[in-house]
């Protein structure tokens, strides 16, 4: 980070005495972007600029060229008609804030990141807000968040507390954001900003990305383009209820706010306590949506994802193969099968636990994290031995934030669950699921112990799938005082983060998957503690093309668990050939979610081959730069994207047909991200055709591939009895000198 504060002295005449007035400009920058604030002492902190990098010498001109001239962190009370980021009720009932700059600080964090803090103080009340900016220079990311505190004699009520705010010059500004539902997560919506308010929000309580997401792309130059145009990306790094607001009135700017959803969450701030808002990460690119995605991906891999620089193992997960029907012989068979197909890890999903109440289905046992010895007489130890015998690693499913009312935990500790006083709770999955009250430190200990006990007893466990299958349906904490019931949502996520921090401090190496009824928790609040997330409970390969496309707007492929599953698919009942299922799964963190016993020999051979081929390209998918080429949402009959290694010497290209007609004419896809000067040899992976492609083994320049691309045959050249209505291709490109 580079921060320049230049001071310009001017003079104002007051009576006959000249008094210097200091105008300070804070320039926060990354390698290619700048954010400029006007921070004159005793004055309102105003927002001047965010976008392409400008030099220090250009700042003066930039300021006279015209700026939003708006508070950088607008607070309620003295400009009531505007939307605000912050509102508070002082101890004496006064509902106004008037914040002015009292200083600028720069600090370096232990990992070397630079943080600039502008200290704002109320003109009358002892109320302070630090507006913070952290920069990741070569990732083009600027994080902003605030710290709110006071020294009033009593409790100040915070009624709004956004993390950050950004003015956007009115023009043809569009917003791209994700929407969805269970089994249809991360679909893309794009819309122009018009008058009124666009609100993107979540109120699930526990999970926050099944429906909309706390990340957006803001295209400043008209309808969103993949490779061109100025785009701002914003990601609220938070796991709880959020609210993103775009307000457009009669001014020259749209006002964008992002933060915790304050609804039903009034916060009572004690004297001396500091309320820290979640980080809002901003990035900017002139390379369209793709440029912003690549910025997020690079930043995530280095800073926001556990082990973002380590290759992921290829795994078999037991869920769709056996559901709750776990038993020792079955697990051993699945381990033998994944091992024989070249896999490296087996994950035993739901159904392995419960003593007094064995987990036969989803209506009991959550909370009782002891092995069901009827199903697994030799316990986890026996399973670990099996894994060792088959030369693979072992992983296990847990859902530690939850209980069922049919469980020993609930019998012993009914006070641990979230429920309102004087009312019976509404129950979730299986008719009995409840959420544990993570605002309670005893519950935090309990959740920590679920992992700690497993890992202490079985340190060989390599992978944990951490699930969360219920929202907070009833507002009520049995732990929080009656005055602080409105803290529940916030304290839940503080509690969760505390537990995750403890787990990571003690078990830094274990791989942990972030799952919440599928993709309910794909957010940058939690990902620093997790290695990956389950994109969706929907494993239908065609629908995954759309969901993984949307997910890739903000999240890198290394974090996207993507599994080959059965046909007909268990969610859509669509029958998709194994080749296509493989080709889609191979564009993320490859896994398998199928009963291998039910696979044909042909299918097994293809999967085995795909696993071997994936191992050769895994580093490109997991660490490379992603270029989206043909958008499935544009309904052109196909979708395509590619990954390119950082040094541009290797690449993997994906193409999937999304619909089939006779006399179909699909666009010829041009590639992207290659070095135009380099020569690349083309080799098809997962080939099923009787004859190789006409360009198999041929060498093309990056320039040719990016300007002309290669024709994709509309169907596969296979024997008549193997024909079907799907087609897909995976090409490996390698530089030849
Ligand atoms: C959730 C997960 C699934 C599976 C089940 C087990 O739905 O998303 O992958 O683990 O729970 O009950």
Image: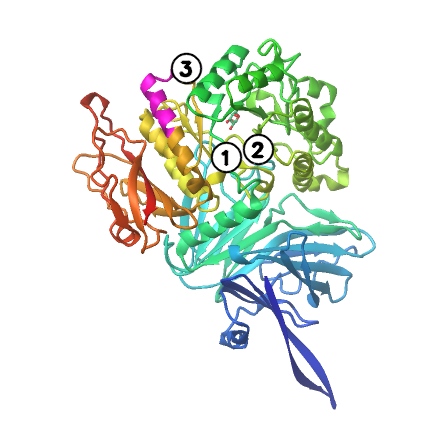
User: In this rendering, is residue 730 above or below 377?
Assistant: below
Q: Position of residue 728 (x, y in %)?
A: 29, 35
The earlier-in-sequence mark between 1 and 3 is 1
Is the N terminus in the top left, top right, bottom left or bottom right quadrant? Answer: bottom right
**Which residue is painted at 76% across and 66% down in the image?**
124
Residue 312 — which label?
A: 1
The earlier-in-sequence mark between 3 and 2 is 2
> Circle 2: is it few (<14), some (14-19), or many (20+) Cα within 10 Å?
many
Residue 667 — which label?
A: none
The earlier-in-sequence mark between 2 and 1 is 1
From this viewpoint, is residue 411 visible?
yes
Q: Which is nearer the eye, 149 or 302?
A: 302
In-image side of 461 versus 584 (left or right): right
User: In this rendering, is residue 298 above or below 306?
Assistant: below
User: In this rendering, is residue 416 above or below 375?
Assistant: below
Asked whether the residues under the numbered discs 3 and 2 touch, taking CB atoms below 8 Å apart as contact, a structural biologist would say no
- Prevailing secondary structure of the magenta residues: helix
Please give the range of residues in magenta: 598-610
- Mark 1 → mark 3, Cα distance in angstroms: 25 Å
User: From this viewpoint, which residue is outermost toward the right?
Assistant: 153
Asked whether the residues under the numbered discs 2 and 1 touch, taking CB atoms below 8 Å apart as contact, a structural biologist would say yes
**Which residue is painted at 53% across and 42% down in the image?**
309
Q: Secondary structure at mark 1?
A: loop
Q: Quarter of the image holding residue 126?
A: bottom right
Q: Secondary structure at mark 3?
A: helix
- The residue where tag 2 is placed is 511
Residue 597 — which label?
A: 3
């Amino acid at each position: 980070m580079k921060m320049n504060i230049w001071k310009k002295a001017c003079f104002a005449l007051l009576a006959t005495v000249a008094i210097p007035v200091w105008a300070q400009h804070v320039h926060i920058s990354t390698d290619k972007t700048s954010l400029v604030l006007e921070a004159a002492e005793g004055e309102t902190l105003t927002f001047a600029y965010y976008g392409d990098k400008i030099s220090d010498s250009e700042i003066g001109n930039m300021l006279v060229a015209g700026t939003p001239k708006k508070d950088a962190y607008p607070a309620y009370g003295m400009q009531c008609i505007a939307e605000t980021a912050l509102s508070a009720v002082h101890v004496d009932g006064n509902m106004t804030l008037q914040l002015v700059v009292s200083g600028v600080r720069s600090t370096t964090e232990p990992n070397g990141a630079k943080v600039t803090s502008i200290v704002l103080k109320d003109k009358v009340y002892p109320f302070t807000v630090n507006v913070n900016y952290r920069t990741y220079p070569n990732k083009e990311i600027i994080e902003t968040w605030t710290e709110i505190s006071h020294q009033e004699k009593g409790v100040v009520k915070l009624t709004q507390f956004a993390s950050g705010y950004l003015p956007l010059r009115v023009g043809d500004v569009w917003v791209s954001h994700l929407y969805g539902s269970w089994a249809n997560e991360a679909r893309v919506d794009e819309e122009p900003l018009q008058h009124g308010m666009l609100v993107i929000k979540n109120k699930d309580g526990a999970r926050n990305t099944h429906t909309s997401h706390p990340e957006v792309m803001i295209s400043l130059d008209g309808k969103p383009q993949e490779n061109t145009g100025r785009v701002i990306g914003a990601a609220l790094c938070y796991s709880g209820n959020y609210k993103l607001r775009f307000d457009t009135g009669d001014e020259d700017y749209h006002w964008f706010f992002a933060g915790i959803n304050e609804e039903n969450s009034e916060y009572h701030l004690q004297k001396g306590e500091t309320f820290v808002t979640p980080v809002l990460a901003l990035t900017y690119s002139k390379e369209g949506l793709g440029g912003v995605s690549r910025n997020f991906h690079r930043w995530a891999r280095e800073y926001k994802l556990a082990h973002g620089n380590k290759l992921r193992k290829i795994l078999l997960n037991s869920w769709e193969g056996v559901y709750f029907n776990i038993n020792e012989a079955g697990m051993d068979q699945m381990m033998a099968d994944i091992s024989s197909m070249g896999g490296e890890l087996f994950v035993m999903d739901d159904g392995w636990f419960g003593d007094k109440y064995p987990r036969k289905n989803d209506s009991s046992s959550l909370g009782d994290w002891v092995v069901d010895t009827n199903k697994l007489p030799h316990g986890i130890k026996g399973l670990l031995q099996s894994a060792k015998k088959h030369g693979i690693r072992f992983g296990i499913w847990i859902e530690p934030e939850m209980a069922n009312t049919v469980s020993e935990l609930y019998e012993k500790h009914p006070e641990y669950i979230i429920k309102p006083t004087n009312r019976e709770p509404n129950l979730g999955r299986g008719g009995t699921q409840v959420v544990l009250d993570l605002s309670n430190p005893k519950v935090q200990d309990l959740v920590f112990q679920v992992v700690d006990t497993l890992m202490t007893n079985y340190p060989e466990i390599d992978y944990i799938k951490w699930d969360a299958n219920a929202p907070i349906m009833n507002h009520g904490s049995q732990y929080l005082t009656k005055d602080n019931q409105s803290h529940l949502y916030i304290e839940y996520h503080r509690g969760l983060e505390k537990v995750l921090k403890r787990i990571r401090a003690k078990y830094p190496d274990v791989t942990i998957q972030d799952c919440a009824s599928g993709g309910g928790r794909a957010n940058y609040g939690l990902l620093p503690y997790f290695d990956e997330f389950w994109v969706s409970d929907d494993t239908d390969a065609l629908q995954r093309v759309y969901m993984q496309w949307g997910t890739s707007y903000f999240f890198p492929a290394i974090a996207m668990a993507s599994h080959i599953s059965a046909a007909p698919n268990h969610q859509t009942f669509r029958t998709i050939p194994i080749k296509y299922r493989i080709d889609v799964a191979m564009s993320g963190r490859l896994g398998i979610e199928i009963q291998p016993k039910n696979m044909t020999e042909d299918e097994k051979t293809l999967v085995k081959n795909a696993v071997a081929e994936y191992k050769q390209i895994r580093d490109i998918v997991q660490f490379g730069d992603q270029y989206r080429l043909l958008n499935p949402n544009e309904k052109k009959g196909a979708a395509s994207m590619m990954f390119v290694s950082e040094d541009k010497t290797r690449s993997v290209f994906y193409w999937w047909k999304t619909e089939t007609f006779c006399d179909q004419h699909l666009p010829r896809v041009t590639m992207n991200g290659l070095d135009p000067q380099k020569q690349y040899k083309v080799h098809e992976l997962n080939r099923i055709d009787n004859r190789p492609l006409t360009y198999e083994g041929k060498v093309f320049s990056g320039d040719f591939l990016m300007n002309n691309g290669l024709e994709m045959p509309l169907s596969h050249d296979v024997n008549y009895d193997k024909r079907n209505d799907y087609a897909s291709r995976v090409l490996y490109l390698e530089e030849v000198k």
